[in-house]
Image (cartoon, helix red, strand yellow):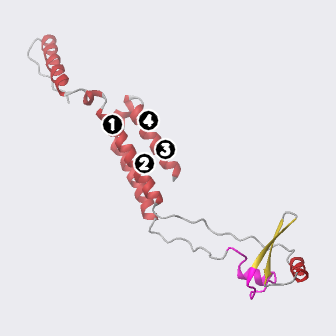
Amino acid sequence: MVALRVGLVLFVLAWLFGPYELRTLVPIWLAFLIALGLELHYFSGAFRALPERGADRGPQEIDRERYGYDSESDELLLVREEGEELWVPYSGESDEELDALIEEARDPPEPTWSPPVRRRGRGLLVGLGVIAALALTTWVVESRTAWDAVDADARAAAEARFSDEGSRIAGHNVTVHCR
């Protein structure tokens, strides 16, 4: 979905600063309508249920049973030796007992996976910021280009000149109004 946002931004920038033919073929409201739909999709995603997040980052209960960890242990001790990591149940054992526990734990447990944490609302705020920035850029560019960039006095003078030249060419009275 991030690629869609980036593509939309690139399209709007191409629409603003690209060839005039693109602006005449594609109305800008179409791009903003697509952006609105995209942001509404992100917004509705904030109300969907999040996956359950495991609170325990150590071995799960099934791994403790499979590999013989005592579920009564107060805590687990992470032992790193020779590039190997072992979780060992620890309840105040002596050094000799701890060495025996490490030898028992030499068979590495299967790694566990936890889903990434989703932050609610952040995507919506980013999307609304992108839409606002694009709308502002469009407004600034459109108000300072073509006929809109000409002040009212210059417009009136140009319309009078166009009317005079049109009358001269046509051979009869012509009135030109520019919008």
Q: Which mark is residue 130?
A: 2
Q: Position of residue 54 (x, y in %)?
A: 62, 75
At label 4, the amino acid type is Ala
Give whichever of discs 3 and 4 has the lower sequence position. Answer: 3
How far is disc 1 from disc 4 in space, using C-alphas?
15 Å
Above or below, comparing residue 95 to residue 148 in the picture: below
Q: Earlier in the sequence, mark 3 or mark 2?
A: 3
The residue furthest left is 173
Q: Which dot marks residue 7?
A: 3
Q: Which residue is mark 1?
A: 140
35 lies above or below 169 = below
Looking at the magenta stretch, what is its main secondary structure? loop
- The range drawn in magenta is 57-75
Q: Is residue 66 magenta?
A: yes
Horizontally, is 93 left or right of 55 in the view? right
Q: Is residue 145 above or below residue 157?
A: below
Q: Quadrant of the C terminus?
A: top left
